[in-house]
């Protein structure tokens, strides 16, 4: 079964700093999709960024970018110029062919003023 | 275009009662997914449904849990004879189609179930 591991339960940085959240996954699939979701205190799940495994270029969305290392099965999220509103739980997720999302345990990120 | 709607947002039940959670997908979406989030954990897949069909129920507990997505109306996740361990946030997501493999799942705000 596919698994997703986030090894950092909590992280804390100062506003405007850059922070990187780690994620590794295990799969025997060759074609798949990876996602980072943000869950603020409201508990709403918000898609931050996605990456198709067949694309070598790392995805970017404004201040958010990923470092996708397919051979190492690593998918880290970098947040640049962090803002107070970035404070949330962040979940890495893997999408397998049967459509369901497999989530990691989450990283609680706190941005300090 | 309204997003995914879930109701109720909060549900309190006593042990042994039934819980019914409703999910209305986004307009035009015919694929629905249910996930459960226990405190301090990530979301765990429960079931994937299309209209009138269960496609994948590999994450559903074998007993007391059932799900449906009728031709008309919302998808329903039903939990019979609830126990304290059922206390969790239940999220519904919808997508426009199942294939190709990539299509975004849009999440609802969740229903927080508390079992006393």
Image (spheres, rainbow, N blue to C red):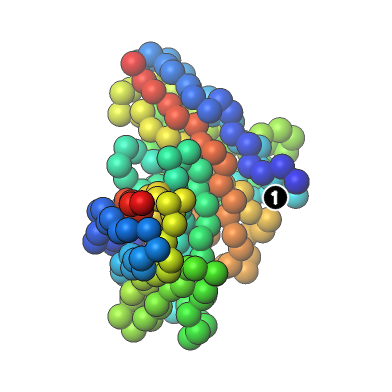
Instruction: Residue A12: name its quadrant.
Output: bottom left
Q: Quadrant of residue A19?
A: bottom left
Q: Position of residue B92 (x, y in %)?
A: 54, 42
Q: Picture coordinates of residue A3 (x, y %)?
A: 32, 62
Residue at x-position 74% and y-position 35%: B72
Q: Residues within 10 Å of mark 1 (few under 14, many from 20)?
A: some
Question: From what the image shows, is residue B116 above or below residue B39?
Answer: above
Residue A56 seen in the figure: yes
Considering only vertical position in the picture, is B50 above or below A34?
above
List the single residue furthest toward the front: A113
Q: Is residue B36 left or right of residue B55?
A: left
Label 1 marks which chain's residue?
B
Q: Residue at x 40, y 63 (%)?
A: A16
Count of marks overlaid on the render: 1
Q: Nearer the viewer, residue B61 or A74?
A: A74
Question: Would you say A45 lies left or right of A82 here?
Answer: right
Please name the residue shown 33% across and 76% down the image. Answer: A73
Q: Nearer the viewer, residue A67 or B73?
A: A67
Is A70 rendered above or below residue A51?
below
Image spot of residue A109 (x, y percent): 34, 53
**Is B23 left, or right, of B88 in this rendering?**
right
Q: Tell which of A14 and B35 is nearer to you.
A: A14
Residue B51 visible in the current orientation: no
Q: Which residue is mark 1?
A: B29
Horizontal arrangement in the rendering, residue A22 relative to residue B69 (left or right): left
Q: Position of residue B1 (x, y in %)?
A: 75, 46
The structure residue drawn at horizontal position 48% and vertical position 86%, both measured from the top left corner, is: A56
Question: Dot 1 lies on which element?
Answer: loop
């Amino acid at each position: 079964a596919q698994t997703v591991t986030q090894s950092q339960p909590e992280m804390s940085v100062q506003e405007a700093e850059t922070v990187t959240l780690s994620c590794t996954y295990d799969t025997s699939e060759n074609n798949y999709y990876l996602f980072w979701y943000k869950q603020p205190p409201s508990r709403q799940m918000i898609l931050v960024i996605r990456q198709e495994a067949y694309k070598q270029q790392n995805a970017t969305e404004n201040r958010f970018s990923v470092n996708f290392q397919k051979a190492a099965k690593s998918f880290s999220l970098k947040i640049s110029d962090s803002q107070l509103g970035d404070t949330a739980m962040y979940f890495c997720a893997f999408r397998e062919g049967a459509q369901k999302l497999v989530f990691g345990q989450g990283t609680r990120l706190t941005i300090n003023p | 275009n309204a997003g995914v709607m879930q109701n109720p947002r909060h549900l309190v039940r006593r042990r042994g009662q039934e819980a019914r959670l409703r999910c209305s997908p986004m307009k035009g979406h015919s694929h629905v997914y249910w996930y459960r989030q226990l405190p301090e954990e990530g979301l765990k897949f429960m079931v994937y449904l299309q209209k009138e069909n269960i496609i994948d129920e590999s994450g559903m507990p074998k007993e007391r849990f059932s799900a449906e997505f009728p031709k008309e109306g919302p998808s329903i996740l039903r939990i019979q004879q609830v126990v304290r361990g059922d206390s969790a946030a239940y999220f519904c997501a919808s997508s426009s189609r199942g294939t190709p493999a990539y299509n975004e799942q849009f999440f609802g705000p969740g229903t927080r179930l508390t079992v006393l």
